[in-house]
Image (cartoon, rainbow, N blue to C red):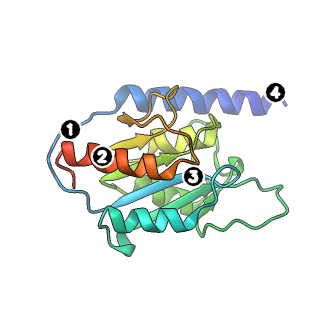
């Protein structure tokens, strides 16, 4: 139990270090690659995520989704790429290739579509190599843009996302 707390503390320190050292570069490059992080205990609308891909005009091979799952859950996730709390090691070490490849991909846009403040979700957002990060969690300082909406109100989020991406010349 003590080791679990120390492990979480080491990962929180790593998150703080990543956020502090992040360099944001403003540019007018159009979005070509998108990554989406969701919590599968909170959001299960895969159809909307696929529709969002069409709205953002991103090719299927350049659109990637990863979901946090509970390994103790009896139901199987609807998402193809998943990770869990067990995939995080000490001091920001990632144990699985699925999560490593998602985090290391230099996406033009990362959408953190979750409201819970679970450490693995915040870790994934903070350590992602994405150039521009959008989320709905306002307590987190890991996102560049926060669109405060209810997670079930996908149409408002989509409308606001497109509006701000157009203002920033990203679409």
| Of the pair 12 and 171, the residue shown nearer to us | 171
From the image, state whether disc 3 or disc 4 is nearer to you. 3
| Of the pair 91 and 156, the residue shown nearer to us | 156
**Whole-percent x, y for residue 90 in the image:** 63, 38
Crowding at dot 4, Cα within 10 Å, few <14 / some 14-19 / many 20+, comes out as: few
Q: Is residue 48 above or below residue 125?
A: below
Marks 3 and 4, how far apart at CA: 28 Å
Residue at 52%, 34% (x, y): give it.
Answer: 137
Marks 3 and 1, how far apart at CA: 25 Å
Residue contact between numbered discs 3 and 1, judged by CB atoms under 8 Å: no
Return the mark for residue 25: 1
Crowding at dot 2, Cα within 10 Å, few <14 / some 14-19 / many 20+, comes out as: some
Q: Name the residue tied to disc 3.
A: 38
Query: In this figure, what is the number of numbered marks?
Result: 4
Q: Name the residue tied to disc 2.
A: 131
From the image, state whether disc 3 or disc 1 is nearer to you. 3
**Whole-percent x, y for residue 166 in the image:** 21, 48
**Is label 4 in a helix, a strand or a loop?**
helix
48 horizontally vs 168: left or right = right
Crowding at dot 1, Cα within 10 Å, few <14 / some 14-19 / many 20+, comes out as: few
Crowding at dot 3, Cα within 10 Å, few <14 / some 14-19 / many 20+, comes out as: many
Residue at 32%, 61% (x, y): give it.
Answer: 56
Residue contact between numbered discs 2 and 1, judged by CB atoms under 8 Å: yes
Mark closest to the chain's N terminus, 3 or 4 = 4
Marks 2 and 1, how far apart at CA: 8 Å
Residue at 45%, 64% (x, y): give it.
Answer: 64
Residue at 56%, 65% (x, y): give it.
Answer: 46
Mark closest to the chain's N terminus, 3 or 1 = 1
């Amino acid at each position: 139990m003590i080791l679990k707390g120390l492990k979480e503390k080491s990962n929180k320190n790593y998150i703080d270090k990543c956020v502090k050292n992040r360099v944001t570069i403003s540019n007018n490059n159009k979005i070509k690659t998108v990554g989406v992080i969701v919590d599968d205990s909170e959001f299960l609308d895969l159809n909307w995520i696929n529709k969002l891909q069409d709205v953002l005009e991103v090719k299927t091979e350049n659109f990637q989704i990863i979901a946090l799952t509970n390994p103790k859950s009896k139901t199987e996730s609807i998402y193809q790429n998943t990770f869990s709390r067990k995939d995080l090691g000490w001091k920001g070490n990632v144990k699985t290739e699925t999560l490593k490849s998602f985090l290391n991909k230099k996406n033009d846009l990362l959408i953190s579509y979750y409201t819970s403040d679970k450490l693995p979700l915040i870790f994934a957002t903070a350590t992602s190599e994405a150039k521009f990060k959008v989320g709905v969690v306002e307590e987190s300082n890991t996102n560049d843009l926060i669109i405060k909406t209810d997670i079930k109100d996908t149409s408002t989020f989509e409308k606001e996302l497109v509006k701000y991406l157009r203002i920033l010349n990203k679409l």
